[in-house]
Image: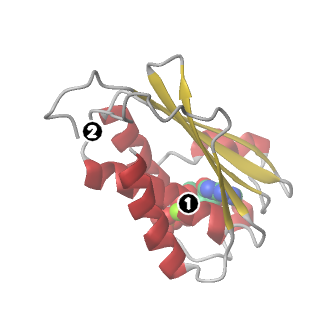
Amino acid sequence: LDECILDALSLIYSKYKTREIIISFPESIPADSEPFLVEANMQLLRTAFVNILDNACKYSTQAVGLTLEKKDNSTFLVTVTDQGIGIEKEQVDKVFLPLYRATNSRNFPGFGIGLAVTKKIIDLFKGTISIDSNSDEGTIVTVEIPAAPFSDNSL
Ligand code: ATP
Ligand code: MG
């Protein structure tokens, strides 16, 4: 999972060259802990994180937050936080629909496809994605992905 997030970050850094992304590990992971493994296709998962990070950078101007956390030893928890334009409460549920774009975002470039694809990808790996947002304040996207038992063919 960390390799896939690093890949996503490098793509985002090359697109938004000067943007600060603050990465944190709320619960520090002991050095001798099991590796971060999830059963997922790396390219697909990277696409999912690129889409989420791209939105956070596109719809805000300040630093973006990224947290990586292990939850109950069986789930990986990733959050992406921005302090941007946010989404109106009545529109939050619609952003996973293909081609849907919230009213306040229509001056920004985009097709309304990124989150629909992202949701499909996260579903494929039996994870969940949720969005908490306030208009004019910012957005928090939370992704949970179940951990895979350690095995050599896990990606
Ligand atoms: P693209 O397909 O190029 O990603 P997009 O960014 O418009 O276009 P999605 O990524 O699917 O499409 O997001 C859907 C809509 O959800 C956006 O148009 C925007 O209205 C809203 N949205 C998503 N993320 C954020 C965010 N971090 N802040 C504010 N609005 C957001
Ligand atoms: Mg997008």
**Direction front: furthest residue:** 32
Spot occupied by residue 142 in the image (x, y as percentages of width and height): 60, 38
Residue with the mark numbered 1: 53
The label number, if any, that marks residue 40 in the structure image: 2
Q: Quadrant of the rendered structure where residue 93 is? A: top right
Does residue 34 appear to the left or right of 73 in the view shown? left
Q: Quadrant of the rendered structure where residue 61 is? A: bottom right
Does residue 111 appear to the left or right of 3 in the view shown? right
Q: Of residues 49 and 107, which is closer to you in this image?
A: 49
Q: Earlier in the sequence, mark 2 or mark 1?
A: 2
Q: Amino acid at mark 1?
A: Leu
Q: In the figure, 123 relative to 87: above or below?
A: above
Residue 47 visible at all:
yes
Residue 99 visible at all:
no
Q: Of residues 149 and 121, which is closer to you in this image?
A: 149
The label number, if any, that marks residue 21 in the structure image: none
Label 1: which secondary element = helix
Q: In the figure, 1 relative to 109: above or below?
A: above
Spot occupied by residue 46 in the image (x, y as percentages of width and height): 37, 55
Q: In the figure, 99 relative to 106: above or below?
A: above
Q: Amino acid at mark 2?
A: Ala
Quadrant in which the C terminus appears: top left
Residue at 59%, 44% (x, y): give it: 94
Residue at 39%, 38% (x, y): give it: 122
Is the image coloured rainbow, by chain, by secondary structure, or in one colour?
Answer: secondary structure
**Direction left: furthest residue:** 153
Query: Does mark 2 have its CB less than 8 Å from ligand 1?
Result: no
Report how far apart the C-alphas of labels 2 and 1 lie in the structure. 19 Å
